[in-house]
Image: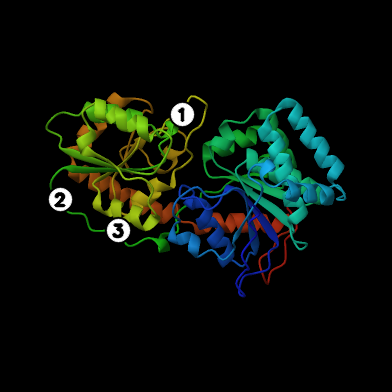
Amino acid sequence: MTQDAAPAPPDAAAPTLAVVAKGYPRLSETFVAQELLALESRGFGFEIWSLRHPYDDRTHPLHDRIRARPRYLPEYLYQEPLRLLRAWRAARRLPGYRAARAAWLRDWRRDPTPNRGRRWGQALVLAAELPPGTGGIYVHFLHTPGSVARYAGILRGLPWAVSAHAKDIWTIPDWEKREKLAEAAFAVTCTASGAAELRRLAPTDARVGLVYHGLDLTRFPDPPERGAAEGPLRLLSVGRLVAKKGYDDLLEALARLPAEVDWRFDHIGGGDLKASLAARAESLGLADRIRWLGKKDQTEVVAAMRAADLFVLPSKIAEDGDRDGLPNVLMEAASQRLPILSTAVSAIPEFVRDGREGRLVPPGDPQALAEALTALATDPQGRAEMAETALARLRAEFGMEAGIDALSARLQAMGVAPAGASAQPAAAE
Protein backbone atom coordinates (compact mmCIF):
# COMPACT_ATOMS: atom_id res chain seq x y z
CA MET A 1 0.00 0.00 0.00
CA THR A 2 1.08 3.58 -0.56
CA GLN A 3 2.15 5.56 2.48
CA ASP A 4 2.18 9.29 1.89
CA ALA A 5 3.72 11.95 4.03
CA ALA A 6 1.97 13.27 7.10
CA PRO A 7 1.11 16.97 6.83
CA ALA A 8 4.07 19.17 7.74
CA PRO A 9 3.71 21.35 10.83
CA PRO A 10 2.93 25.00 10.08
CA ASP A 11 6.43 26.15 11.04
CA ALA A 12 8.22 23.73 8.69
CA ALA A 13 9.99 25.33 5.74
CA ALA A 14 8.54 24.53 2.31
CA PRO A 15 10.36 21.51 0.85
CA THR A 16 12.88 22.60 -1.77
CA LEU A 17 15.09 19.54 -1.28
CA ALA A 18 14.34 15.84 -1.64
CA VAL A 19 16.37 13.69 0.75
CA VAL A 20 16.63 10.06 -0.31
CA ALA A 21 17.55 7.31 2.16
CA LYS A 22 17.73 3.55 1.87
CA GLY A 23 15.60 3.13 4.98
CA TYR A 24 14.19 5.66 7.41
CA PRO A 25 14.08 5.85 10.34
CA ARG A 26 16.80 3.43 11.43
CA LEU A 27 18.28 2.93 14.88
CA SER A 28 21.70 2.20 13.39
CA GLU A 29 21.84 5.46 11.40
CA THR A 30 21.75 8.20 14.02
CA PHE A 31 24.22 10.14 11.87
CA VAL A 32 21.49 10.59 9.24
CA ALA A 33 18.91 11.78 11.76
CA GLN A 34 21.41 14.12 13.45
CA GLU A 35 22.23 15.71 10.09
CA LEU A 36 18.59 16.13 9.05
CA LEU A 37 17.69 17.79 12.34
CA ALA A 38 20.64 20.16 11.96
CA LEU A 39 19.66 21.05 8.39
CA GLU A 40 16.12 21.80 9.53
CA SER A 41 17.51 24.05 12.25
CA ARG A 42 19.41 25.93 9.52
CA GLY A 43 16.15 26.57 7.65
CA PHE A 44 16.31 23.89 4.95
CA GLY A 45 12.94 22.50 3.96
CA PHE A 46 12.89 18.94 2.64
CA GLU A 47 10.91 15.77 2.22
CA ILE A 48 12.40 12.41 3.12
CA TRP A 49 11.99 9.68 0.51
CA SER A 50 12.83 6.19 1.72
CA LEU A 51 13.44 3.12 -0.44
CA ARG A 52 12.41 0.84 2.41
CA HIS A 53 9.96 0.87 5.28
CA PRO A 54 11.41 0.80 8.80
CA TYR A 55 12.11 -2.58 10.35
CA ASP A 56 13.14 -1.52 13.87
CA ASP A 57 10.61 -1.86 16.68
CA ARG A 58 11.39 1.63 18.03
CA THR A 59 13.00 4.93 17.12
CA HIS A 60 15.37 7.32 18.84
CA PRO A 61 14.02 10.44 20.57
CA LEU A 62 16.08 12.30 17.96
CA HIS A 63 13.72 11.14 15.21
CA ASP A 64 10.75 12.72 16.97
CA ARG A 65 12.37 16.15 16.75
CA ILE A 66 12.61 16.09 12.94
CA ARG A 67 9.60 17.89 11.44
CA ALA A 68 9.90 16.36 7.96
CA ARG A 69 7.99 13.12 7.63
CA PRO A 70 9.07 10.26 5.38
CA ARG A 71 7.38 9.15 2.19
CA TYR A 72 7.98 5.60 1.08
CA LEU A 73 8.76 4.52 -2.46
CA PRO A 74 7.55 1.05 -3.51
CA GLU A 75 9.89 -1.31 -1.68
CA TYR A 76 9.04 -4.03 -4.19
CA LEU A 77 7.47 -2.95 -7.45
CA TYR A 78 4.86 -5.74 -7.57
CA GLN A 79 3.37 -4.41 -4.32
CA GLU A 80 2.18 -1.14 -5.89
CA PRO A 81 1.57 -1.76 -9.61
CA LEU A 82 -0.96 1.04 -10.10
CA ARG A 83 1.30 3.60 -8.45
CA LEU A 84 4.15 2.46 -10.66
CA LEU A 85 1.99 2.62 -13.80
CA ARG A 86 0.87 6.16 -12.98
CA ALA A 87 4.48 7.16 -12.37
CA TRP A 88 5.65 5.65 -15.67
CA ARG A 89 2.96 7.49 -17.60
CA ALA A 90 3.90 10.78 -15.93
CA ALA A 91 7.65 10.20 -16.28
CA ARG A 92 7.40 9.51 -20.01
CA ARG A 93 6.29 13.13 -20.46
CA LEU A 94 9.32 14.50 -18.63
CA PRO A 95 12.05 16.02 -20.84
CA GLY A 96 14.73 13.84 -19.27
CA TYR A 97 12.97 10.53 -19.78
CA ARG A 98 14.95 9.35 -22.80
CA ALA A 99 18.30 10.26 -21.25
CA ALA A 100 17.40 8.65 -17.93
CA ARG A 101 16.18 5.46 -19.60
CA ALA A 102 19.38 5.30 -21.66
CA ALA A 103 21.48 5.70 -18.49
CA TRP A 104 19.53 2.96 -16.74
CA LEU A 105 19.85 0.61 -19.72
CA ARG A 106 23.63 1.12 -19.81
CA ASP A 107 23.77 0.23 -16.13
CA TRP A 108 21.42 -2.74 -16.52
CA ARG A 109 23.55 -4.26 -19.29
CA ARG A 110 26.49 -4.32 -16.86
CA ASP A 111 24.36 -5.26 -13.86
CA PRO A 112 21.32 -7.21 -15.11
CA THR A 113 19.76 -7.83 -11.69
CA PRO A 114 16.28 -7.43 -10.19
CA ASN A 115 17.82 -4.83 -7.87
CA ARG A 116 18.75 -2.64 -10.85
CA GLY A 117 15.25 -2.92 -12.26
CA ARG A 118 13.73 -2.02 -8.91
CA ARG A 119 15.83 1.14 -8.69
CA TRP A 120 14.50 2.29 -12.08
CA GLY A 121 10.94 1.77 -10.93
CA GLN A 122 11.55 3.64 -7.69
CA ALA A 123 13.17 6.50 -9.63
CA LEU A 124 10.09 6.76 -11.85
CA VAL A 125 7.87 7.11 -8.78
CA LEU A 126 10.21 9.62 -7.13
CA ALA A 127 10.43 11.78 -10.26
CA ALA A 128 6.67 11.68 -10.80
CA GLU A 129 5.75 12.51 -7.20
CA LEU A 130 8.31 15.18 -6.28
CA PRO A 131 6.56 18.46 -5.45
CA PRO A 132 6.90 21.23 -8.08
CA GLY A 133 9.18 23.43 -5.97
CA THR A 134 11.90 20.81 -5.54
CA GLY A 135 15.27 22.28 -6.49
CA GLY A 136 17.59 19.33 -5.93
CA ILE A 137 18.04 15.81 -4.60
CA TYR A 138 20.41 14.83 -1.79
CA VAL A 139 20.92 11.15 -1.12
CA HIS A 140 22.55 9.13 1.65
CA PHE A 141 24.60 6.21 0.31
CA LEU A 142 26.15 5.95 -3.12
CA HIS A 143 25.02 2.45 -4.07
CA THR A 144 21.31 1.66 -4.54
CA PRO A 145 19.91 4.94 -3.14
CA GLY A 146 22.43 6.80 -5.29
CA SER A 147 21.07 5.06 -8.39
CA VAL A 148 17.50 6.10 -7.58
CA ALA A 149 18.58 9.70 -6.99
CA ARG A 150 20.64 9.77 -10.18
CA TYR A 151 17.90 8.43 -12.45
CA ALA A 152 15.29 10.71 -10.85
CA GLY A 153 17.57 13.71 -11.20
CA ILE A 154 18.01 13.06 -14.91
CA LEU A 155 14.26 12.54 -15.34
CA ARG A 156 13.41 15.84 -13.67
CA GLY A 157 16.44 17.81 -14.82
CA LEU A 158 17.47 18.40 -11.21
CA PRO A 159 20.94 18.46 -9.68
CA TRP A 160 21.66 15.67 -7.24
CA ALA A 161 24.35 15.12 -4.63
CA VAL A 162 25.40 12.25 -2.42
CA SER A 163 26.72 11.54 1.05
CA ALA A 164 28.75 8.32 0.86
CA HIS A 165 29.70 6.29 3.91
CA ALA A 166 31.36 2.87 3.97
CA LYS A 167 29.77 -0.22 2.38
CA ASP A 168 28.50 1.90 -0.50
CA ILE A 169 32.04 3.07 -1.29
CA TRP A 170 33.83 -0.25 -1.00
CA THR A 171 31.40 -2.77 -2.46
CA ILE A 172 30.27 -1.27 -5.79
CA PRO A 173 32.38 -1.42 -8.98
CA ASP A 174 34.65 1.40 -10.10
CA TRP A 175 32.64 2.05 -13.26
CA GLU A 176 29.55 2.82 -11.19
CA LYS A 177 31.36 5.09 -8.77
CA ARG A 178 33.14 6.91 -11.60
CA GLU A 179 29.94 7.60 -13.56
CA LYS A 180 27.95 8.71 -10.54
CA LEU A 181 30.72 11.05 -9.39
CA ALA A 182 30.94 12.54 -12.88
CA GLU A 183 27.24 13.46 -12.77
CA ALA A 184 26.73 14.40 -9.11
CA ALA A 185 26.87 18.07 -8.19
CA PHE A 186 29.03 17.03 -5.26
CA ALA A 187 29.84 14.10 -3.02
CA VAL A 188 30.73 14.21 0.65
CA THR A 189 31.97 11.39 2.80
CA CYS A 190 32.72 10.97 6.47
CA THR A 191 36.22 9.47 6.38
CA ALA A 192 39.57 10.44 4.90
CA SER A 193 40.03 6.92 3.51
CA GLY A 194 36.65 7.12 1.80
CA ALA A 195 37.41 10.57 0.40
CA ALA A 196 40.69 9.32 -1.06
CA GLU A 197 38.93 6.41 -2.77
CA LEU A 198 36.25 8.66 -4.27
CA ARG A 199 38.76 11.29 -5.42
CA ARG A 200 40.62 8.52 -7.23
CA LEU A 201 37.59 8.18 -9.49
CA ALA A 202 36.07 11.67 -9.49
CA PRO A 203 36.62 14.12 -12.37
CA THR A 204 38.22 16.58 -9.94
CA ASP A 205 39.31 16.39 -6.31
CA ALA A 206 37.01 19.33 -5.52
CA ARG A 207 33.97 17.23 -6.43
CA VAL A 208 34.49 15.24 -3.19
CA GLY A 209 34.45 16.76 0.29
CA LEU A 210 35.53 15.26 3.61
CA VAL A 211 32.74 16.05 6.06
CA TYR A 212 32.85 14.29 9.41
CA HIS A 213 29.43 13.69 10.92
CA GLY A 214 30.82 14.61 14.29
CA LEU A 215 28.59 14.59 17.32
CA ASP A 216 25.98 17.07 18.50
CA LEU A 217 27.09 17.19 22.10
CA THR A 218 23.98 19.12 23.13
CA ARG A 219 22.06 15.83 22.78
CA PHE A 220 24.19 14.08 25.39
CA PRO A 221 24.44 14.50 29.16
CA ASP A 222 27.67 15.70 30.69
CA PRO A 223 29.97 12.73 31.23
CA PRO A 224 29.99 11.09 34.65
CA GLU A 225 32.91 11.39 37.00
CA ARG A 226 34.33 7.90 36.96
CA GLY A 227 35.83 6.55 40.14
CA ALA A 228 37.51 3.24 40.84
CA ALA A 229 35.57 0.35 39.29
CA GLU A 230 34.11 -2.18 41.70
CA GLY A 231 33.29 -5.77 40.87
CA PRO A 232 33.73 -7.31 37.42
CA LEU A 233 35.07 -5.27 34.50
CA ARG A 234 31.91 -4.18 32.65
CA LEU A 235 32.46 -4.40 28.90
CA LEU A 236 30.00 -2.87 26.44
CA SER A 237 29.61 -2.84 22.69
CA VAL A 238 26.95 -1.27 20.49
CA GLY A 239 26.66 -2.37 16.88
CA ARG A 240 24.83 -4.57 14.43
CA LEU A 241 25.57 -8.27 14.64
CA VAL A 242 27.10 -8.49 11.18
CA ALA A 243 30.47 -9.74 9.96
CA LYS A 244 32.23 -6.38 9.70
CA LYS A 245 31.73 -5.68 13.41
CA GLY A 246 34.05 -8.54 14.37
CA TYR A 247 32.08 -9.95 17.30
CA ASP A 248 33.29 -13.45 16.45
CA ASP A 249 36.83 -12.22 17.17
CA LEU A 250 35.69 -10.66 20.44
CA LEU A 251 34.22 -13.95 21.66
CA GLU A 252 37.48 -15.75 20.87
CA ALA A 253 39.38 -13.03 22.71
CA LEU A 254 37.14 -13.25 25.78
CA ALA A 255 37.71 -16.99 25.88
CA ARG A 256 41.47 -16.37 26.06
CA LEU A 257 41.41 -13.97 29.00
CA PRO A 258 43.25 -15.20 32.09
CA ALA A 259 41.11 -16.51 34.93
CA GLU A 260 42.05 -13.60 37.19
CA VAL A 261 40.29 -11.11 34.87
CA ASP A 262 36.70 -10.97 36.08
CA TRP A 263 34.46 -9.51 33.37
CA ARG A 264 30.89 -9.18 32.11
CA PHE A 265 29.91 -8.20 28.57
CA ASP A 266 26.74 -6.48 27.37
CA HIS A 267 25.92 -6.11 23.68
CA ILE A 268 23.32 -3.71 22.27
CA GLY A 269 22.03 -4.13 18.73
CA GLY A 270 20.34 -6.61 16.45
CA GLY A 271 21.52 -8.52 13.41
CA ASP A 272 21.50 -11.73 11.44
CA LEU A 273 24.42 -13.28 13.34
CA LYS A 274 22.80 -13.18 16.77
CA ALA A 275 21.92 -16.88 16.92
CA SER A 276 25.31 -18.09 15.68
CA LEU A 277 27.20 -15.76 18.01
CA ALA A 278 25.11 -16.76 21.00
CA ALA A 279 25.74 -20.43 20.13
CA ARG A 280 29.47 -19.77 19.87
CA ALA A 281 29.46 -18.03 23.25
CA GLU A 282 27.73 -21.08 24.71
CA SER A 283 30.28 -23.47 23.21
CA LEU A 284 33.15 -21.36 24.58
CA GLY A 285 31.64 -21.42 28.08
CA LEU A 286 31.01 -17.67 28.10
CA ALA A 287 27.23 -17.49 27.96
CA ASP A 288 26.69 -16.86 31.66
CA ARG A 289 28.79 -13.68 31.46
CA ILE A 290 27.25 -12.22 28.30
CA ARG A 291 23.94 -10.43 27.78
CA TRP A 292 22.58 -9.90 24.27
CA LEU A 293 20.31 -6.95 24.96
CA GLY A 294 18.94 -6.36 21.46
CA LYS A 295 17.96 -3.02 20.01
CA LYS A 296 17.81 0.02 22.27
CA ASP A 297 17.10 3.69 21.69
CA GLN A 298 19.78 6.29 22.26
CA THR A 299 18.62 7.16 25.77
CA GLU A 300 19.12 3.52 26.77
CA VAL A 301 22.45 3.32 24.94
CA VAL A 302 23.82 6.35 26.77
CA ALA A 303 22.68 4.93 30.11
CA ALA A 304 24.55 1.70 29.34
CA MET A 305 27.67 3.67 28.41
CA ARG A 306 27.58 5.56 31.69
CA ALA A 307 27.41 2.28 33.60
CA ALA A 308 30.20 0.50 31.67
CA ASP A 309 33.97 0.43 32.29
CA LEU A 310 35.25 -0.20 28.75
CA PHE A 311 33.74 0.13 25.27
CA VAL A 312 34.87 -2.52 22.78
CA LEU A 313 34.34 -2.40 19.01
CA PRO A 314 36.39 -5.09 17.16
CA SER A 315 35.61 -3.95 13.58
CA LYS A 316 37.21 -5.59 10.54
CA ILE A 317 36.80 -5.83 6.77
CA ALA A 318 34.21 -8.46 5.84
CA GLU A 319 34.80 -10.96 3.05
CA ASP A 320 32.61 -8.95 0.65
CA GLY A 321 34.64 -5.78 1.31
CA ASP A 322 32.10 -4.21 3.66
CA ARG A 323 33.63 -2.23 6.50
CA ASP A 324 32.89 0.51 8.98
CA GLY A 325 33.56 4.16 8.33
CA LEU A 326 34.04 6.13 11.53
CA PRO A 327 31.40 4.59 13.81
CA ASN A 328 29.45 7.23 15.71
CA VAL A 329 29.29 4.93 18.72
CA LEU A 330 32.99 5.57 19.34
CA MET A 331 32.34 9.28 19.66
CA GLU A 332 29.27 8.60 21.78
CA ALA A 333 31.40 6.48 24.13
CA ALA A 334 33.99 9.25 24.30
CA SER A 335 31.25 11.77 25.15
CA GLN A 336 30.56 9.74 28.32
CA ARG A 337 34.24 9.46 29.28
CA LEU A 338 34.10 5.73 28.55
CA PRO A 339 37.49 4.18 27.64
CA ILE A 340 37.70 2.67 24.13
CA LEU A 341 39.26 -0.49 22.70
CA SER A 342 38.87 -0.90 18.95
CA THR A 343 40.78 -1.89 15.82
CA ALA A 344 43.04 -0.04 13.38
CA VAL A 345 40.73 -0.40 10.39
CA SER A 346 39.09 2.03 8.00
CA ALA A 347 38.62 5.48 9.58
CA ILE A 348 38.71 4.47 13.24
CA PRO A 349 42.33 5.72 13.63
CA GLU A 350 41.18 9.13 12.37
CA PHE A 351 39.57 9.61 15.79
CA VAL A 352 41.21 7.05 18.08
CA ARG A 353 45.00 6.98 18.05
CA ASP A 354 46.53 3.97 19.76
CA GLY A 355 47.66 4.76 23.27
CA ARG A 356 46.20 8.28 23.18
CA GLU A 357 42.41 8.31 22.80
CA GLY A 358 42.16 4.56 23.37
CA ARG A 359 43.73 1.28 22.36
CA LEU A 360 43.75 -0.06 18.79
CA VAL A 361 44.72 -3.58 17.77
CA PRO A 362 44.97 -5.16 14.31
CA PRO A 363 41.58 -6.20 12.91
CA GLY A 364 40.75 -9.88 12.86
CA ASP A 365 43.31 -10.72 15.57
CA PRO A 366 41.65 -12.29 18.64
CA GLN A 367 44.96 -12.81 20.41
CA ALA A 368 45.91 -9.13 20.15
CA LEU A 369 42.42 -8.22 21.32
CA ALA A 370 42.75 -10.55 24.33
CA GLU A 371 46.12 -9.08 25.25
CA ALA A 372 44.77 -5.52 25.06
CA LEU A 373 41.74 -6.45 27.15
CA THR A 374 44.00 -8.01 29.78
CA ALA A 375 46.26 -4.96 29.90
CA LEU A 376 43.35 -2.52 30.14
CA ALA A 377 41.63 -4.59 32.84
CA THR A 378 44.65 -4.13 35.09
CA ASP A 379 45.29 -0.46 34.28
CA PRO A 380 42.34 1.67 35.45
CA GLN A 381 44.50 4.80 35.53
CA GLY A 382 45.60 4.32 31.92
CA ARG A 383 41.99 3.75 30.86
CA ALA A 384 40.92 6.94 32.59
CA GLU A 385 43.68 9.02 31.00
CA MET A 386 42.87 7.82 27.48
CA ALA A 387 39.15 8.42 28.04
CA GLU A 388 39.89 12.00 29.11
CA THR A 389 42.04 12.55 26.02
CA ALA A 390 39.30 11.16 23.77
CA LEU A 391 36.69 13.44 25.35
CA ALA A 392 38.93 16.48 24.85
CA ARG A 393 39.56 15.60 21.20
CA LEU A 394 35.87 15.00 20.58
CA ARG A 395 35.01 18.44 21.92
CA ALA A 396 37.82 20.19 20.05
CA GLU A 397 37.81 18.47 16.66
CA PHE A 398 34.72 16.31 16.16
CA GLY A 399 31.76 18.51 16.94
CA MET A 400 28.87 18.51 14.47
CA GLU A 401 28.71 22.18 13.46
CA ALA A 402 31.75 22.30 11.17
CA GLY A 403 30.39 19.47 9.05
CA ILE A 404 26.94 21.05 8.81
CA ASP A 405 28.54 24.35 7.77
CA ALA A 406 30.34 22.59 4.92
CA LEU A 407 27.27 20.63 3.82
CA SER A 408 25.05 23.72 3.94
CA ALA A 409 27.48 25.62 1.73
CA ARG A 410 27.56 22.83 -0.85
CA LEU A 411 23.77 22.51 -0.92
CA GLN A 412 23.43 26.24 -1.50
CA ALA A 413 26.03 26.09 -4.28
CA MET A 414 23.91 23.33 -5.84
CA GLY A 415 20.97 25.74 -5.88
CA VAL A 416 19.06 24.73 -2.74
CA ALA A 417 18.80 27.51 -0.18
CA PRO A 418 17.43 27.53 3.36
CA ALA A 419 14.45 29.70 4.15
CA GLY A 420 15.30 33.39 3.93
CA ALA A 421 18.54 32.83 2.00
CA SER A 422 19.49 32.81 -1.65
CA ALA A 423 21.26 29.94 -3.33
CA GLN A 424 24.90 30.63 -4.09
CA PRO A 425 26.44 30.06 -7.52
CA ALA A 426 28.51 26.90 -7.77
CA ALA A 427 32.24 27.43 -7.55
CA ALA A 428 34.39 26.25 -10.43
CA GLU A 429 36.09 22.93 -9.79
Q: Which residue is mark 1?
A: 317
Q: Secondary structure at mark 1?
A: loop
The amino acid marked with disc number 2 is: Ala
Residue ID at (72%, 67%):
422
- Helix, strand or loop status at disc 2: loop
The total number of labels drawn is: 3
Query: Which is more toward the observer, 235 or 90?
Result: 90
Mark 3 / mark 1, whichever is N-terminal = 3
| Depth order, front residue of 387/83 | 83
Tell me if residue 89 comes above or below residue 112 in the rendering: below
Q: From the viewer's perspective, is the residue at label 2 or at label 1 nearer?
A: 1
Q: Residue at x 30, y 29 (%)?
A: 279
Residue plotted at (74% across, 57% down)? 130
Q: Is residue 228 above or below residue 246?
A: below
Circle 2 residues within 10 Å: few <14, some 14–19, many ≥20: few
Where is mark 2, residue-wise?
A: 228
Q: Position of residue 86 (x, y in %)?
A: 79, 51
Q: Earlier in the sequence, mark 2 or mark 1?
A: 2
